[in-house]
Image (tube, rainbow, N blue to C red):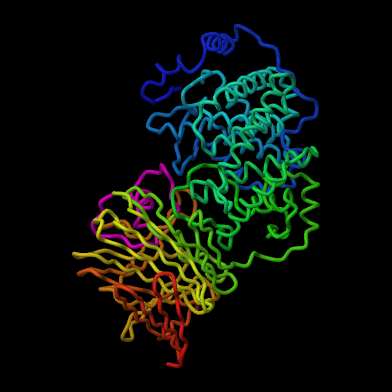
Amino acid sequence: MELASIEGARRDKSAATTLPGRLRSALTARGWVRRPEPRVRFGQPVFPGVASLGPAQRDVAAAFVAEAAAVRKGTVTHLGRSVRFPKQLAWFPRGTSPGWQQALNAHDELLAIAVAGATASDPAERRAWYELAKDLVRDWIRQVPAGHPVAWTVPALARRIRNHLLMGALFATELRGDVETRRELLVSLYDQAGALAAATAKHAPSPWLVAAGQALMLAGRFFDGMEARSWIEAGTVLLWGRLRDQGRDDGAQESRSPGWQAFVLAEYLGVLAILRADNDDIPVWGRKHVKGMTDALARIVQPGGLLPEFGPTPVDGTWPVAEILATAAVVLHDPTFAQTPELPGIWPLLLLGESGRRTYAGFTRTGEIVPEARAVRRTGYYVLAGGPGDMMVLDGGAHPCSDGSAVFGYDLSVGGLPLVVGSRVTLEEDGAIPGHARTRRARNVLVPARLSGEPEGEIEGRFTVREGVQYFLGTAKGFAGLGADVQYRRRVFCLPGRFWFVCDEITGRGTFAGETLVHFHPDVAVRAACAGKPVVTIARSETSAVSVLVAGVRSIGLVGGATKPDTQGWYATAPGAWAPAPAVVLRVNGSLPITIGYALVPGDEGPTGEIAVESDAFELRAGVRLGKTVYELTAVQDEVGLVVRPA
């Protein structure tokens, strides 16, 4: 079995822990010294709902079972990259990054195997899953030394401690009859918790400190003794201390990443669920802060539970949004977050148990959250809401890509289904298509033909609602590294139930060439017509469709599933599963200033309407004619006006 492929891992290992600790680990791993089994608290279930998981939840656990089956066949996936192990799993496979190895050593696969075993109705199948879990745990304990510079980092320790505790709880019956494996597992867990408590003091502030706080709390409540109680105190200090730092005043996570927002919120909901089950006190300010984080997530989640794809997915194992909101509904006593008829998924059941299920069933639901025009100003996200089930989530800033920054991107749902989408971004999947998905050309943004790779200059976003029109104005100076005198403005107007109008302006001196891109979901049908001016109709269902009207562009193209000359028009339906997806390409070039625009009109009837757009140094004027009605929009900085008149 291979050890770490990281340069210097073997050399640095000696400095990662004390000499007595290394000696103890080496002797124990070789079976020379039998340490006594650490004391545990009687009846501690790790999470309140562990005992509720059984064969009745087999269908709900399908994703966990599929992951466990893949591991049994030798395939492990992390950070979007799958690695095949033909014979035996290597904990530090050659050719993988430190981040991938760290995720592997967090042992999320072990939790999936335990859930598969706990939900198996056949005792023989359950036993087979246990044997697989036991073999992985014992192999890891024997092969990976304490203090390893990858496997014993704070992120790996935090997640692995939780997963080992849950594996022990879900296979409690088997472990009672397997004394040696139980002793090895508990001794290793105890050492890991002590190492995590020591490591957090030196770890830079990050969401992983929140996960570490939960892991220390879980370990401290599971084990008995003075040291275990100190872990509870350390975990509590971490959790409440980081809560103030992780969330902005508007409830959004400090990194502006929807993925990290979901991750951090899930960690805190787990803690609140534990405290709720034990009738422990929860700080009022802490509950209020967690509710603010839940509100912020609920504002930007699209119909169907999808988070906007503005940037890379930063972490594995984030819960589905529906499960996060359902858990929040119970622990925060707020039925407005209860969007599904029944408590969904495995995580809410593990955290809440049967009492939580009954509480959830007793909620009076208001139905699906109706999108409303909102501005999460400090974070820079904006919701331009149309009719029921119609919402645009817009990024009022810049998200880093492999070739620069994607500025003022957006996702759009119509009729309750995601329609305009960004490609799901994974960090480490190989190949031309995943590589393309990490670039700005996979986002719904304006992309210059000449890319400098330099960061954007000053970026500012404003949002207002006037005369029924929702209006966003974003400004980027020094756009795409093209020079301080080149300024980019994206204006987005929403007239609910009528249209969204996106206008791109590039001002300054010189010339400009580039493309404005609009990416659609792979399940859509496309119809194009040209009756004087081109109209493209995109339909995903009878109620989920838009017509695209354009103005000011040099040419319009439609591409999907292309690999030559450039990769374009792909969408990840699942990690590693790419499907061709249509992208509308609006090409522009010429002398500055340049103004182009397009309207997204709900409906699949392909209106014969048209749009026009023009601007000067002070004012933008746009017109949208739909049937027998003309909508005239004017915008001066962050002020907007609307005139509606007959055609």
Viewer can see residue 563: yes
Q: Is residue 291 left or right of residue 616?
A: right
Q: Is residue 297 above or below residue 101?
A: below
Q: List the single residue furthest toward the top.
A: 32
Residue at 55%, 18% (x, y): give it. 142
The one nearer the camera, 107 or 211, is 211
User: Which x, y percent locates residue 194?
Assistant: 61, 21
Q: How many marks?
A: 0
Location of the C terminus by quadrant is bottom left
Residue 439 included in the magenta stretch of the image: yes
Residue at 51%, 58% (x, y): give it. 377
Q: Is residue 7 above or below residue 618?
A: above
Magenta stretch prevailing secondary structure:
loop
Instruction: Kindly indicate the quadrant of the structure image that contains residue 548.
Output: bottom left
Residue 200 included in the magenta stretch of the image: no
User: Which x, y percent locates residue 589?
Assistant: 23, 68
Instruction: Kindly indicate the quadrant of the structure image that contains residue 299.
Output: bottom right
Q: Is residue 557 left or right of residue 234?
A: left
Viewer can see residue 128: no
User: Which x, y percent locates residue 529?
Assistant: 36, 81
The one nearer the camera, 125 or 382, is 382
- The magenta segment: 424-453
The one nearer the camera, 113 or 124, is 113
Q: Is residue 623 above or below residue 503?
A: below
Location of the N terminus by quadrant is top left
Q: Is residue 247 left or right of residue 343?
A: left
User: Which x, y percent locates residue 154?
Assistant: 53, 29
